[in-house]
Amino acid sequence: MFVVKKTTLLVTVLALANITFGQTERPKLVVGIIVDQMRQEYLYRFEEHYGEDGFKRLLHEGFEVKNGHYNYIPTYTGPGHASVYTGTTPRVHGIISNYWYSRKIKDMMYCAGDSTASAVGGSQENGKISSRNLLATTITDELKLFTQGASKVVGVAIKDRGASLPAGHMADGAYWYDSKTGTFMSSDYYMNELPNWVSKFNKLDKANEYLNMTWDTVKPIESYIESADDNNPYEGAFTGQRLPAFPYDLKALKEKNEGFGLLPSTPFGNSITTDFALAAIAGESLGSDNITDFLAVSYSSTDYVGHRFGPHSKEIQDTYIRLDQDLTRLFAALDEKVGRDGYLVFLSADHAVADVPNYLKDLKIPAGNFVAKKHLPEISTALNNKFGEGQWVENTSSDQVFLNLPLLEEKGIDKREMQVFLADKINQLEGVSQAFTGADMTNGYYQTGTQSLLQAGYNLDRSGDVLLVYEPGWISSSWPTGTTHGSGFTYDTHVPILFAGWGIKKGSTVQKYHITDIAPTLSMLLNIKLPSGATGSPILEIFE
């Protein structure tokens, strides 16, 4: 992290930097927007309800990659944000899941967790956060390196991983929502105290303001013909509300639903994120000079709502209509403060989402719920019968099995032999398409198919011994309502990729590109170095 002193020399250096970095024209500000759990189809399924200055502005004035996908498994939030901003996959950047089992500490590791960090603002329990687990540089890091720290980089999100991973290792600030206090906070990895503008924002008590509202559809619910019936058996209700149906009295629901922790599960989590992003633009004077700054915004509430209600709910439709209004607010403020042609914006998602399995089954489409712990006893019995009594499985998480390697070594058992045996047994379980071994991932090289997606998500130091892949339509969940994501099927991988503003011509392509191509595209547009581990390539049509 760069530390500078307010001296005459510094003023001179920055003045020269302002000239030098301005010699090749660049935008004053780059705005990266990640929408958590956004299907590409949402751009079009809800299009009739969008205004002209949100999603439609990006579609009509910018460049759209219509066939943009994730190119690895698993498709989760942490890996998604890391992959967009590093231009590579978990195999290289190391963020293999939101949580993964660490053999070194014999416990779960959180993707943005940092035991050495302490809270700045907010609650202490939510402050052990940084980008330390990210093994490669981000496009935001590279911008800081290029300008010798003169560029400002700020990350903003409800989720701490949605703020910290995009902001990178050298950020001026990463800020996330604290569900205990209803305020935005950071950690001492980034700063020693909150800037005045953050403290002033927190005093506005925006969380309480939103939680005193009623969440009803922003338009007449009868017009939401693009989604299923409001009250249906595929959605999960809030605690304290009998039916999953509008309206939602948030003030009445607050105390029974984690207090301030309720806000992210409503579209107003996106609204307070927009409020805070606008405060950051003003408070940090982003885009106010010729040295390019970077604002990374992640909208998390779409994920919370999507998990609970599913992609065909009226709740998710209303959330996207409201997000469109928040984007309109954001773009209007940027137009005013930076200038309509002064900033470059891109929008994508960290993953998409599967349909609710019971919804598909009622439509006669194959689907199901896989409950891993239900099968653990039979798996353990099979291992004991084959290799003798022992605690052979050390951990199961994120659709991976971690074997007890010290015990294998002690008993003189070949690791690959047990991996192959276990994979064969798991292959026989209903809902499992195929199980692959760690040896498959490390000893071969796959260019296509499921194996290539798994291999791109496999990190030698952090991944497990056996990896599960489910049948299409199946998810790992014991809940009869709601849904999730994580697979390499198109319903989880197909996400929007949009560029607009400075240096971007109007157009589109149906050529297949990957989200790992976003950072290299930005590098070429900004004429800066590629992130250290980048494996993606620029989106060629943008430069033609």
Image: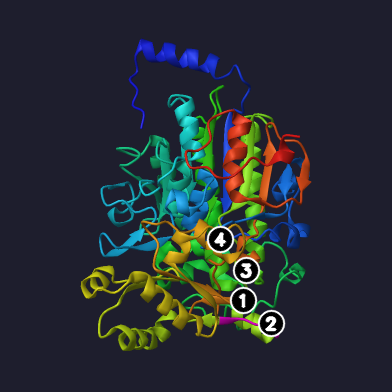
Real-space Cα distance between discs 2 and 4? Answer: 25 Å
From this viewpoint, is residue 78 visible?
Answer: yes
Real-space Cα distance between discs 3 and 2? Answer: 23 Å
In what element is the residue under mark 1? loop
Image point (61%, 20%), residue name: 24
As drawn, the label of residue 382 is none
* Residue bearing mark 1: 473
Nearer to us of marks 2 and 4 is 4
Name the amino acid, label 1: Gly
Image point (42%, 43%), residue name: 174
Query: Magenta span covers which residues?
Result: 363-368
| 2 or 4: tag closer to the N-terminus | 2
Real-space Cα distance between discs 1 and 3? Answer: 22 Å
In what element is the residue under mark 3? helix
Residue 365 drawn in magenta = yes
* Residue bearing mark 2: 365
List the single residue furthest toward the left.
Answer: 410
Residue 520 position in % (x across, y down):
59, 39
Residue 245: which quarter of the image? bottom right
Residue 506: which quarter of the image? top right
Does 328 sit left or right of 206 as displayed? right
* Residue bearing mark 3: 315
- The answer to whether the residue labelled 1 contacts the one labelled 2, judged by CB atoms less than 8 Å apart, is yes
Residue 327 position in % (x across, y down):
64, 47
Real-space Cα distance between discs 4 and 3? Answer: 32 Å
